[in-house]
Structures are given as C-alpha cells and as structure tokens.
Image (spheres, rainbow, N blue to C red):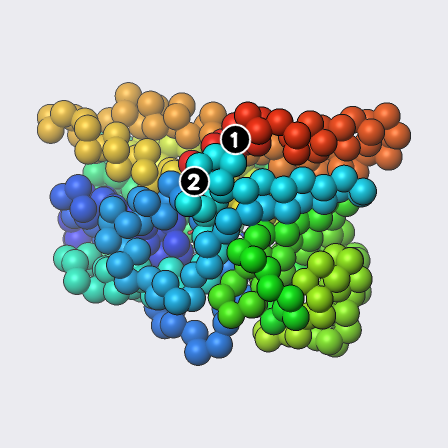
C-alpha cells in the first residue's frame, strides 16, 4: 500500500501543473498516467499549440516552470485582429497598457518544462499504470491499479481528459453539447510578417485562426463542420495552404506548410459536479470547451490555482478532502466555466444567424468596440486573466 496526501490521475498539462503546484505547497503527491508522458522537445514545430493568458504565464513563472521553457520557441501576442463579414476589429495590448495579450507556445515546449521541473522533486510517478477502481469514504480515498498496487490518499484529483474514467468511477454525469465540428490544426511559414498579431475570422459555424509563432510561422486552428473538415483533410498540404490563403484574403500572403494537418473533434462537455467525496475533477475531465476562445488549458490551470490556494490557506487541522473546502472550490470554478460555455456557444450561434438585423447588430458591435477605447480596454482586461 502506497500512502500519500494527494494522488493525481492524468499527466497531461493540467495534471502536471497540479503535481508541481501542490508539491510547492508541501503536499506529497503521486502522479498516475496510463501512458508514459512525452517530455521531449520536438526538432521541428509542434502542431499542438496553446494561447496562454499573461496571468497563467505569470503563474508558471512563480512555479519556476517558465524558467525551463525554451523562450526562443514562444511568440508574444501584441494584437488581435478579428473579422466577421465586412466588419473587423483590432485589439492592441497597448489599449490596455499591457506588454502583451498572452503568448503562443507549443504543447511539447510546455511538457518539456514540466518534465524538467518534476525531475528534481520527490514526486512518485506511476506511468504506464492503468486504474482499476476507486474507493472513497469520508476518511480517505483509495486508488487501485491493475498491477495490484493500492494508493491511499487524502484527496484524489481526476485530470484524465474529457473521457475521464475517474469521473465515471465517481458516478459523476456530464452535460454534452456536440458542435458537430472538427478543428484542423497545422503550422505554416507565412510570406508576410504577422507582427505578433493573432488573426481570427468568424463565419457561420466556422472559426479560422492564424496564431503567431517565431520565424514568421503561423499556427492554424480552423474549426468547421466535421463533414467539411473531412473533405479538407483529403487535400494535399499545398492545396490546403492555398485554400487557407483564399479564406483569409491572403492577409499573410502565401503560406508554406511546415507540418501535416491534424484533426480534433470539438465538443463542449461539462461534468455535473466538479467534486465528490475526497475527490476533485480538474482540466478537461471537469470541462471541455470549444477552442475558439483558446481557453481550455487556461481554465484547467485556473482550477489548479484555485485548488492550491484553498488548500494552502486552509487551517492545518482541516483535512485535505474537507467537504466545505471542496464545495468552496467548486463554487469558485463553476462560475468561470459556465461563463466560458456561454461565451463559446453564444458566439457560435450568433455568428451563424442568418437574420439580417442581427448581423447588422453584430457589425455595429464590432464598430462600437473599435471606436471606444474604454470598451476595448475592458474586453482585453477580461481576456487576459
Ligand atoms: C484544436 C484545439 C486547440 C486548442 N487550443 C487551445 C488554446 O489555444 N489554449 C488553451 O488554453 N486550450 C486549448 N485547447 C484545449 C486544450 O487542449 C485542453 O483543454 C487541454 O489539453 C486539457 O488538458 P488536460 O491535462 O485536462 O487533459 P489531457 O491533455 O487530455 O490529458 C489527460 C491525461 O490523462 C491520461 N489519462 C487518460 N485516461 C487515463 C486513465 N484512465 N488512467 C490514467 N491516465 C489517463 C492521458 O494519458 C493524458 O496524459 C485546444 C484544444 C483543441 C482540440
């Protein structure tokens, strides 16, 4: 029997960040994953990229994770350029007196940084371990592994993706909104400079983003109906690049593919509860959101920030799995997640409406934001936490 304070299932970015943050506040952590995480830095460019908010970059700095990031592979976002039909809007970091609106970073760059950080800690990692059961009562939680190991802990964190087995084992249901969309991601070298701007086009049930990367590269995140995506995935890399050029009015000139395209089906999935007896769901296990707002992993990091702060501030006599503490955590996180769900489904529906007066209203909204400094500043301040 292995005894620990906290057992985390899932060594994706959110589970890894929880392992670092909870060890920093003095907790003993066991991290379990069905696979061996890949902590290597890619030689080329990774197609999986994240837009991280300045607040989360600051947090990763405070955990000393950022010290291990290869910053030559990170690109700041100084502006956002948004289009809907003929209307466009530009948000600049200077509007809100900020150095940047966030950064674009490759998944493997972050994985590599977490791997390096955890190597130097007392973390007990069980990689390649499959969970076979969970028993939880008011005193403790026990995680059983298929190899016969039992891990007893005060608290269990389920960070095991949108298809969380931990969530199922705890009997927590989900609410699902299937966008019937797929995101195509790939990297390109652009003919024209991107000037550290993130470009995004909104069309009916379709969003296309070109996100700035170093050396004039851009990362594509193109969400569209799954049927259309399947057709586009059959195209050669150069034909796809030409199509993206047309769909973006060649805003960045011609695009040269540097990675193959990959596809991700898009769903909005929210767990009915984020907590159970001596257990907490974090990251995509608790909430999977549409990538149009680039917030999935950012929300997961916010889960960890909130949980670590509540555990750190709790009186030493309060057990880690205290019901009141977990309820406080859940209340805090539900508001944030619901807000993001409303924003992404609302935008998807709004941009898809064919009603002429509503479209005029959207265009009017873009224009108002473009003309009002205070409104742009407020929007930016909301987006960068
Ligand atoms: C196209 C696309 C673009 C995106 N862009 C952005 C962006 O710009 N910014 C942003 O913030 N977010 C973005 N996201 C969302 C982001 O990718 C996810 O929110 C994030 O990766 C979730 O991390 P996680 O650690 O919770 O889960 P995962 O990354 O899914 O990790 C789960 C881990 O659990 C392990 N696991 C699974 N099942 C078990 C089991 N039974 N036992 C043990 N281990 C298990 C897996 O091996 C894995 O290591 C995007 C998503 C998509 C699809």
**Residue 37, x across and y down, in percent:** 37, 65
For the point 54% across and 42% down, the residue is 92
Q: Which mark is residue 205?
A: none
For the point 71% across and 70% down, the residue is 254
Image-based side of 15 in relation to 165, left or right: left
- What is the spatial separation of the Cα atoms under label 1 and label 2, in whole angstroms? 10 Å
For the point 34% across and 24% down, the residue is 327
Task: Please tell me which residue lies in front, 349 or 27.
Answer: 349
Which residue is most to the left?
317
Quadrant position of residue 347: top right
Instruction: Write down the residue under mark 1.
Output: 377
Image-based side of 267 in relation to 334, left or right: right
Q: Which sits earlier in the primary sequence, circle 1 or circle 2?
A: 2
Image-based side of 349 in relation to 314, left or right: right
Q: Which mark is residue 98?
A: 2
- The answer, for residue 339, to whether it is visible in the render is no
């Amino acid at each position: 029997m292995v005894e620990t304070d906290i057992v985390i299932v899932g060594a994706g970015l959110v589970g890894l960040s929880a392992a670092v943050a909870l060890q920093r506040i003095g907790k003993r952590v066991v991290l379990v994953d069905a696979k061996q995480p890949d902590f290597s830095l890619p030689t080329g460019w990774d197609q999986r990229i994240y837009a991280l908010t300045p607040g989360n970059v600051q947090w990763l700095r405070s955990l000393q994770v950022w010290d291990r990031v290869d910053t030559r592979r990170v690109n700041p976002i100084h502006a956002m350029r948004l289009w809907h039909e003929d209307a466009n809007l530009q948000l600049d970091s200077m509007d809100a007196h900020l150095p940047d609106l966030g950064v674009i970073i490759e998944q493997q760059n972050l994985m590599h940084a977490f791997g390096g950080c955890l190597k130097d800690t007392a973390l007990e990692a069980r990689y390649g371990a499959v969970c076979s059961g969970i028993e939880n009562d008011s005193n403790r939680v026990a995680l059983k592994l298929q190899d016969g190991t039992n891990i007893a802990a005060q608290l269990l964190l389920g960070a095991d993706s949108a298809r969380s087995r931990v969530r199922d084992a705890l009997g927590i249901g989900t609410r699902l909104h299937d966008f019937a969309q797929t995101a195509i991601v790939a990297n390109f070298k652009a003919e024209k400079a991107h000037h550290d701007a993130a470009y995004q086009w909104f069309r009916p049930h379709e969003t296309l983003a070109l996100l700035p990367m170093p050396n004039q590269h851009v990362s594509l995140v193109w969400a569209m109906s799954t049927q259309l995506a399947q057709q586009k995935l059959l195209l050669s890399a150069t034909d796809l690049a030409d199509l993206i050029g047309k769909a973006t009015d060649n805003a960045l000139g011609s695009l040269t593919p540097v990675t193959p395209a990959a596809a991700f089906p898009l769903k909005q999935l929210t767990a009915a509860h984020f907590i159970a007896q001596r257990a907490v769901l974090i990251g995509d296990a608790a909430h999977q959101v549409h990538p149009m707002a680039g917030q999935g992993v950012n929300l997961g990091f916010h889960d960890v920030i909130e949980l670590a702060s509540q555990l750190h501030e709790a009186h030493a006599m309060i057990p880690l799995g205290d019901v009141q503490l977990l309820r406080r955590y859940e209340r805090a996180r539900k508001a944030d997640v619901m807000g993001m769900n409303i924003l992404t489904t609302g935008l998807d529906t709004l941009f898809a409406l064919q009603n002429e007066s509503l479209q005029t209203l959207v265009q009017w909204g873009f224009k108002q934001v473009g003309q009002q400094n205070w409104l742009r500043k407020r929007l930016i301040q909301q987006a960068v936490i």
